[in-house]
Image (tube, rainbow, N blue to C red):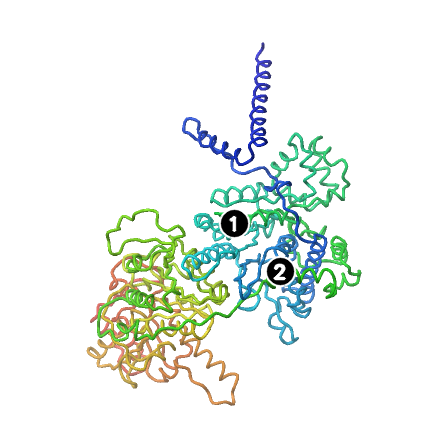
Amino acid sequence: MNGFASAVSQTAMDQEELAEWRDALASLVANAGAARAREILDMLADAGGAPHIAWKPRHGTPYINSIAVEQQPPFPGDLATEERLASVVRWNALAMVVRANQAYGELGGHIASYASAADLFEVGFNHFFRARSDSFGGDLVFYQPHSAPGIYARAFLEGRLSEADLAHYRQEIGAGKAGARGLSSYPHPWLMPDFWQFPTGSMGIGPISSIFQARFMRYLQHRGLQDTTDRHVWGVFGDGEMDEPESMSALTLAAREGLDNLTWVVNCNLQRLDGPVRGNGRIIDELEALFAGAGWNVIKLVWGSDWDALLAKDADGSLVRTLSQTVDGQFQTFAAKDGAYNREHFFGQSEALSKLVEGLSDEQIDRLKRGGHDMVKIHAAYHAARRVAGKPTVILAQTKKGFGMGEAGQGKMTTHQQKKLDREALIAFRNRFQLPLSDEQAESLSFYKPAEGSLEMRYLHQRRAILGGYVPSRGQQAPTVSVPPVSGYGAFATQAEGKEMSTTMAFVRMLTNLLKDKALGPRIVPIVADEARTFGMANLFKQIGIYSSVGQRYEPEDIGSILSYREATDGQILEEGISEASAISSWVAAATSYSVHGLRMLPFYIYYSMFGFQRVGDLIWAAADQRARGFLLGATAGRTTLGGEGLQHQDGSSHLMAATVPNCRAYDPAFAGEFAVILDHGMRQMLEHDVDEFYYVTLMNENYPQPSLPEGVEAAIIKGMYRLSGQPGGKVRLLGSGTLVREAQAAAQLLAEDWQVDAEVFSVTSFSELARDARDMERWNRLHPQQPARRSHLAECLPKGAPVVAVSDYVRAVPQMIGSYVDSAYTVLGTDGFGRSDTRAALRDFFEVDRYHIVLAALTALVEQGSLDRQVCQQAIKRYGVQTDREPSWTS
């Protein structure tokens, strides 16, 4: 036998052997069942992974649905009615966006995203998304932000929004003049506090937030605070959104925690905003590998029911192979083309494929649905997801972006930017979805609502009644929690009498005392990003434990220590590892519990201040949007208090960023007593008075003597400033913030001893609060010229007269927030530039914020006022050894 003949013979034998193995597997399934087959395959996989074989399974499964036809449950609803309702919602969503852009071309909006996701939402609304009631906490649903028009359109059918409301989409300011409600661009609880529950409008925020909301429900359950057993978290997100690091960063946590109360539906329309997600690859395959590798249950929802017959006839596997070899960019092209094109270019790739569609017309080929547009298939996937135990589920649903928009937008590269449609496109859309609209009504973009007694409307209301009511809907009521008097947990701080401590240690001691309070203690949620020991919280490990859904399955190394590490299912601390995004997401879940769960919780998230607003500012902005209530604690704060850590760790900017968040109250207390007042005020505002605000407080790791709190300064501390020393009428006024208050105090002593200059010293607990109050007074006076002028707290403290020098451990822009409201000469010292590693004294000299530079700044201000001779400044420079020839900190 020659070589060629031998090779052919060997190939035939190989194929025969492979066929025998395949037949053996089929026989095993037929005779012993699928479960036994899985058991045998798992055993073989373990054996095949041995080093001498080194076999690894391929990532991914064939490009077909995970749920076989025979596994599908019967569809429980009226399919025809649900499809008609989906068509109506699609039309109204489209009309809403196009009308807004015809009237005001700059308003924007999105048509294509909801067009692709409509059926995914409708199945959820009709069968799975349960509302909150008196006896049930409700499901949590995170809505794809670009699909907001469709959610509004459905609420219009439900009677929760009016036609006038829809006509004012993205016109939130002008709507009130027309007696309508303006509809926000994306889900925004701040703007629509009774409607939207979660903001998802910055990509990636929805996915990570949904994971930590699901985990927080387990936390409440395990701690015995609320029964969340049957509640579920749903998230509908886009495949392009999965590129965001926040979308993927907590996948393993969800699997590790066994969050089977979580289902994601990823709308895989295969397009980002400007083109294909993976034009040269396959996003569904990629996501399947990522989620499966992270430990999620993956359900692929790729093809609609019309494909079942084609796949059943695919005897030689040609169709499955071709589907599995087609990249997303090509699928997008197929989505944008008609049936004739798909017959020629997809099914025409082989004789076997051509034969599969011989009996189908071009129109039938054009109508072959992808899985995410088939309600029967969607229901089967959702039904299966809700029955998975022990792990979260992701449904990868393939759709067409701009589904039904035809030549005007379906599958086009420009689909995401499509805001307007011409007459022919509107009529084609109407025809595609068989809407009862005349040509004139379609062209004029008339909203359509079936008659209230119609089958469609009765069905819609009945389905929502079965599911408990209408969603989305946001609750705002929760029983009040009493805050104990500060004299109980904070007397050591308000009456410190010179005891030495850092404000960080004062916080930990107050927190420890609060945890002992029978009413408030169980509601406190301490959160750290793996830095509890750094912040002196190790004593809480044993006292209240670290939350773990599985308890502690090991004996910790330090078990004999009084501060030993302790994990427990009822643990109270949430320690999120080295991930600020995870920790802030946990904080948001706790900080919105009053709304989401009707249960007031009080979260304290403590972290390196530099890694707060700078690192996860987007998530903090989203927290503000959803009216979070809690404390963010920026520890080791300031640019000169954290000596050795250097550039990346020294915070000089967080207070500037905090000032940009409207409902964030930012404070920089110098002393433990000040912090106690701020803590007491904040807790009462949030827990007792229902104020939708949260608090950012910076804490220092610097130990120094803590004075007792002067009598009667509590209100001034909250307003942002109070006098520490000196009498009104001093020659100069020194404002210090945070730890640099002590430098201002030392500077006042030097001014008195060395230059015979009397100085007033003020502790500024919040430049941003001072600025907000002054801004409010300025505006009121401008708008009420005939009323007596109002004076701000800042003006009361600093009447026109002596020059003012302000010093902060943050960039100059922070104290400059009040600059335009100070009616005297105003000098600012701050820590602009990159941080350095050195001692506190060296750092304060480098940034020119120490006592000597404060003195020089005060003397210079008095010289410019004409109160001192200019040579005094030169004398001070010489006396204090001030370097005059070095580069400023912001350029070096």
Q: Quadrant of the C terminus?
A: bottom left
Residue 653 in view here = no
Q: Position of residue 116 (x, y in %)?
A: 64, 52
Residue 670 in view here = yes
Q: Position of residue 654 (x, y in %)?
A: 39, 64
Query: Mark 1 belongs to which amino acid?
Result: Asp
Query: Above or below — where is 418 with respect to 302?
Result: below
How crowded is the residue under tag 2: few (<14 C-alpha within 10 Å), some, or many (20+)? few
* Residue 466: assigned label: 2
How crowded is the residue under tag 1: few (<14 C-alpha within 10 Å), some, or many (20+)? some
Q: For the residues labelled 2 and 1, say whether their Cβ atoms are less than 8 Å apart.
A: no
Disc nearer the start of the sequence (2/1): 1
* Residue 510: assigned label: none
Q: CA distance from mark 2 to mark 1?
A: 37 Å
Q: Position of residue 372 (x, y in %)?
A: 63, 48
Question: Which residue carries the number 1 mark?
Answer: 243
Q: Is residue 527 left or right of residue 32?
A: left
SS class of the residue under badge 2? helix
Query: Mark 2 belongs to which amino acid?
Result: Ile
